Amino acid sequence: MSFALADVKTTVEQIQSLFAVKRGIALSQALDIVGKRHDVKLDSLKQLLPPTEHETGYLNATQIGERLGGLSAKVVEFVNGL
């Protein structure tokens, strides 16, 4: 198991370097990749990962429009039409 965990560290670094993603995303993917590679279950370790850091799920239509350059009325109209 310790060999697999050491492989996770290396894999995380490679994923971050290649895909320019945040560490938490890289860790999640590395656990999947290494788990399959070494035939060990590492899913329970995902519970230890920090929560994701993104705000897009917390923005309302007006805030999204403001970030797109003041298109809030158009965005609100579009979202309300969904």
Image (cartoon, rainbow, N blue to C red):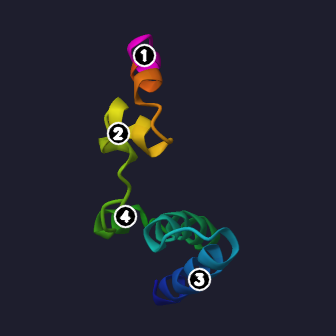
Q: Which residue is mark 3?
A: 13
Which class describes the residues within 10 Å of circle 3: few (<14), some (14-19), or many (20+)? some
Amino acid of disc 3: Glu
The residue at 32%/41% (across/down) is 59
Which class describes the residues within 10 Å of circle 1: few (<14), some (14-19), or many (20+)? few
Direction front: furthest residue = 70
Mark pair 1, 4: CA separation: 39 Å
Q: What element does badge 4 sit on? A: helix
Amino acid of disc 2: Gln
Q: Is residue 81 a member of the stretch shown in magenta?
A: yes
Picture coordinates of residue 54, whole percent (x, y): 38, 55
The residue at 48%/83% (across/down) is 5
Predominant SS along the magenta part: helix
Q: What element does badge 1 sit on? A: helix
The mark closer to the camera, 4 or 3, is: 3
The magenta region covers 77-82
Picture coordinates of residue 53, whole percent (x, y): 36, 61
Mark pair 3, 2: CA separation: 34 Å
Residue 11 against residue 39 in the figure, above or below: below
Mark pair 4, 3: CA separation: 17 Å
Do residues under tags 1 and 3 come within 8 Å of each other at their CB atoms?
Answer: no
Mark pair 2, 4: CA separation: 31 Å
Q: Which residue is mark 1?
A: 77
Q: Earlier in the sequence, mark 1 or mark 4?
A: 4
Q: Earlier in the sequence, mark 2 or mark 4?
A: 4
Tell me the number on the disc at residue 46: 4
The residue at 35%/69% (across/down) is 45
The one nearer the camera, 73 or 45, is: 73
Q: What element does badge 3 sit on? A: helix
Q: Earlier in the sequence, mark 3 or mark 2?
A: 3
Q: Which residue is mark 2?
A: 63
